[in-house]
Amino acid sequence: MDNPPSPSQPPNLPAEITAADLLERYANGERDFRGIQLIGADLSQQNLSGANFRQSNLQNANFSGATLVGANFREAKLTDANFGQATLTLANLIGADLADASLVGADLSEAGMRSANLARADLSQAILRETNLNEAVLDHATLRQAVLTEASLSRGRLLATDLEGANLEQANLTSALMNRAILKNAVLIGAVLTGATLEGVDFQDADLSRAKLSSTNLVNVNFSRANLRGANLSWSSLRGANLRGATLYRTRLSWSNLSGADLTDAVMINAKLDYTNLRRTDVHGTIMPDGFTMSSQD
């Protein structure tokens, strides 16, 4: 007697399926392919919008250039898969394993990627506008020049993640763990990083104007030449931070700890420094809140 199909697999699917079988079934109107195993399949340039691949094993599959609008990859195994230049708008990738996957130039706008594993994945130049990446793992991932405007990465893990030149305007990074991440030349205008752990992050030349960084761990952060105009860094720890040449016009630093920080040549006009700890802080050449420029003798 034949074994019944597993509860996660549609009853009309055979135990084994090929890429050709899948494409034929899709062309005939079938959309439910949950639980299939199709390791290393070549589905590049195909239109599989709305297909259901929930809990499927698609390791090393090639979806480059594919159209996958609204496709369901929830909890699917997609390690080493290639989604380069694919269209994944509104796709469901909640809990998917995308470790070491390539998503270079992919469009993931408004996709659901909560709790997805993207460790070491390459998302260079990917579009992630309004994408939900809450609690996602992006350790050592590459997102150079990626667009993450209004994306949500609350409680995400971004240890040593490369976000150089990325656009994170209005992004939500509340309570994210981002130690040693690279955000050189990144745009974080109005971004929310309240409660985030950013120890050792490189924000050199980044634009953080109006960003919210209160109650944040910024120990040993590199803010050299960064724009922090109107940002809120109150109640944060900036011990040993590099703020050389930074723009701190109207920046709120009340109750923050800047002990041992380097503020050489920083501009702090109208900055709020109420109860700020400036012990052992280097302020040579710094323009203070009252417009007075400090000298080495001051």
Image (cartoon, grey):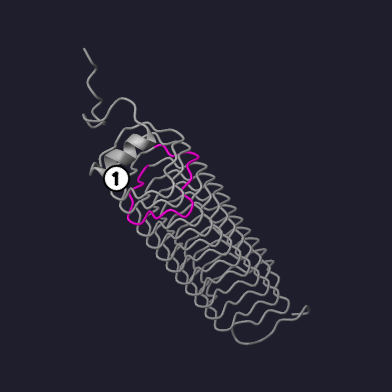
Report if residue 203 lies within the magenta region: no
Residue toward you, 256 or 232: 232
Which residue sits at x=32%, y=37%?
A: 22
Left or right: where 82 falls relative to 129: right
Considering the image in quadrants, where does the C terminus appear? bottom right
Which image quarter: residue 59?
Answer: top left
Q: Is residue 107 visible?
A: yes
Residue 96: x, y in percent? 39, 42
Left/right placement of residue 265 relative to residue 47 reads right
In this rendered view, identify the residue nearer to me: 261 or 61.
Answer: 61
Q: Quadrant of residue 278?
A: bottom right
Judge whether residue 55 can be spotted in this image. no
Q: Position of residue 289 (x, y in %)?
A: 59, 83
Q: Residue at x 23, y 28 (%)?
A: 7
Q: x, y (%) of residue 112?
A: 34, 52
Quadrant that contains the N terminus: top left
Residue marked by disc 1: 51
Q: Residue at x 62, y 70 (%)?
A: 205
Residue range highlighted in magenta: 77-95
The image position of residue 182, as x and y in percent, is: 59, 57
- Give above or below for 297 relative to 157: below
Question: Mark 1 is on which residue type?
Answer: Ala
User: Is 166 situated left or right of 5 in this image?
Assistant: right
Q: Is residue 91 magenta?
A: yes
| Position above or below: 62 against 10 | below
Residue at the extreme right: 297
Mark 1: which secondary structure?
loop
Using the rendered view, name the quadrant where residue 6 is placed: top left
Q: Is residue 95 left or right of residue 230?
A: left
